[in-house]
Amino acid sequence: MKLLIVGLGSMGKRRARLAKGMDASIQISGVDTTESRRAEAEGLGIPAYASIGEAVAAEKFDAALVCTAPITHAGVISELLDAGLPVFTELNLVSDGYEENMKKAKEKGLPLFLSSTMLYRGETRYIKHQVEAFDKPVNYIYHIGQYLPDWHPWENYKNFFVGDKRTGGVREIFGIDLPWLLDTFGPVKSLHVEKDKISQLEVDYPDSYFVTLRHENGVKGMLAVDVVSPKAVRNFECFGEGLHLFWEGNPKSLYTFDHDKGEKLPVNTYESFEHDSRYSDNIVENAYVDELANFFAVLKGTEQPRYSFEKDLETIRLIEAIEEA
């Protein structure tokens, strides 16, 4: 297989590393408009081009991965589809070009695959299965926060997409976590929002949200989302009469409460897991690998994608409703 990775920043390099780890025979080339990133990629043995046009003129690819800033995705995806390539794209955060690109992909018979990495986490899948099996009313409380300057310690937060209001840090958290919450608890019928700015961060959007969601099936959820927490945190708790689950965001912190024993019991959903030390402990590589594996299986016609542009349109509409509330 020959892959073209468009965008050779941190995520592009991660996808290249993981793809090669899955199958050493995979050939990878890249595209980036930044000369220093192209030079770095060349040093890693990845042929790099300044444009998609230059890359597809020089080589024949089986698929492409879009790892650029979200605001650029629509145009990049369109160009890749025009080149006849199946597309895997990272989180979009905005719905620019959705209808046009979905139509184009369908007309050309090309897979259009959208990342939603939390759907591939062993912990979120366990939580969903437990809630479905319980089949009684539940509520949940979920705090997700991380200090914005720590997201990419190697660069200023104002110099990458989280500094842009349309793709800001809080919006990205919603974009990451709402898909698995909607998958687990169902569509939302009403919401209440409290938001403000409590930090000195140089961003033009609220840095702290409290959101109450009422799902169509009656489940109530309370989300606290921020980009000011000094320690990266993902604290989730789901409870109902006879079910109590706890998760602190990493593979070692998933627990269920045993009422008879009166104690929390650990739940292990991984035989082993890989963690990149540059990121907080609630980011593990396994889900990124499983997501790529799903994409490769979609290319072979043996699996369906777990997420889609159609589902993401609903997620983005919910994010916009939260921001406008």
Image (spheres, rainbow, N blue to C red):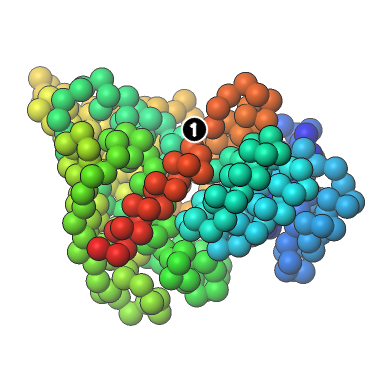
Residue depicted at 67% across the width and 39% down the height:
107
Q: Nearer the viewer, residue 298 or 9?
A: 298
Amino acid, disc 1: Arg
Residue 48 picture location, percent across and down:
80, 57
Q: Say whether residue 146 is left or right of residue 151.
A: left
* Residue 254 visible, this angle: no
Tell me which corner region of the image, top left, top right, bottom left or bottom right, holds residue 254.
Answer: top left
Extreme residue toward the right, this view: 58
Tell me which corner region of the image, top left, top right, bottom left or bottom right, holds residue 249.
Answer: top left
Looking at the image, is 159 positioned above or below residue 267? below
Q: Say whether residue 70 is left or right of residue 216.
A: right
Q: Nearer the viewer, residue 229 or 116?
A: 116
Q: State the quadrant of the C terminus.
A: bottom left
Residue 72 picture location, percent across and down:
60, 62
Q: State the quadrant of the N terminus.
A: top right
Residue depicted at 88% across the width and 52% down the height:
57
Element assignment for label 1: loop
Q: Say whether residue 37 is left or right of residue 291.
A: right
Residue on which disc 1 sits: 306
Tell me which corner region of the image, top left, top right, bottom left or bottom right, holds residue 229.
Answer: bottom left
Residue 323 picture location, percent across and down:
31, 63
Residue depicted at 61% across the width and 34% down the height:
295
Residue depicted at 16% across the width and 36% down the height:
218
Exactly how many numbered labels are in the figure?
1
